[in-house]
Image: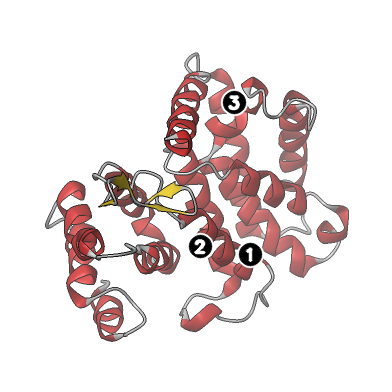
Amino acid sequence: MYEDWFAAMAKDPDMPTPEEVNAIKEFINGQVDADTAAKQCTSRISLEEKSPDPTLIWSFLASLAVEFFDTQDKVVELLAAIKRLPNPIRDGKEHKIYSERTFSDLGYFRADFGDYFRGLKFADPASFHYGSKVPVLISWARVNALSARLTTNLVQDFRRYALDTIEDALDEKYLKESRTREFFLPAAANQIIFASYPLWNLRNDSEVEGRMDAVLEWNRWKTAFEGLAENAEVSHETRAILRQAVAAMETVAQDPERDEWQGKLVQYQASLTAAKES
């Protein structure tokens, strides 16, 4: 299914090497496990003498997950496996890219992904972003699903993106126009569907206090999505995904283990703090 795309990427000098592309392809196709693919697609980076640079891998994986929506879980799994790799050692210390460890923190992934995310947000919804065959209207919804999955699996914490997308979707200036309404609502719904647990746990996050009332916001989102899901001015497809978002909110609210994600987040944040101090 992905053969032509992978073949084209392997020939592109601005993409990872053919060997790295092939390692990722074999994982996506189920031929190797995540840990094996992680080692194979980063081995060259680990051996770079001065400054190991994984950014081509990061961009490639984000593009893959948006181009082929059904690869997103596998892409998140592979990134999680890369985080488990030993970091390259330079001058007796773990190599870092702007204070982020090369593999353990996915050095520069956050900045690289942020550029991609914002590029899609401000692009013409009818256009195609940087040679993609998927229109921006769909890519924007998909990149929000990807950021939500990365957050839920604690590969990165992109809850700020989720909040921004949801707020944009419920902004009256966007809701009153069909073009912007159909652009922002599916993206916001994907944030809820794929990051319902992280968003629920905003109410347990001390960093949120003073910035927003997470309980009131959650209830406001749910009420707004319920109303929009029944609004005849909203397209049938968008109403369907909004209903999925409402169902996800109801599921997490009823889950007795819904607060456990916060404990995992605390451990994740502690590891980042320790890395910066080392």
Vertically, is 132 above or below 138?
Answer: below
Residue 33 - label: none
Give the residue at x 30% y 79%: 9
Give the residue at x 64% y 79%: 126
Q: Which three-letter amino acid code belongs to the residue tagged 3? A: Asn
Q: Nearer the viewer, residue 129 or 222?
A: 129
Mark in the foreground, 3 or 2: 2
Q: Earlier in the sequence, mark 3 or mark 2?
A: 2
What residue does disc 1 label? 118
Q: How many marks?
A: 3
Give the residue at x 47% y 57%: 108
Query: Residue 166 placed where, x, y %?
Result: 70, 47
Is residue 59 shown left or right of residue 33?
right
Mark in the foreground, 2 or 1: 2
Is residue 67 shown left or right of residue 32?
right
Q: Which three-letter amino acid code belongs to the residue tagged 2? A: Asp
Give the residue at x 24% y 75%: 17
Residue 201 - label: 3
Query: Residue 238 placed where, x, y %?
Result: 64, 56
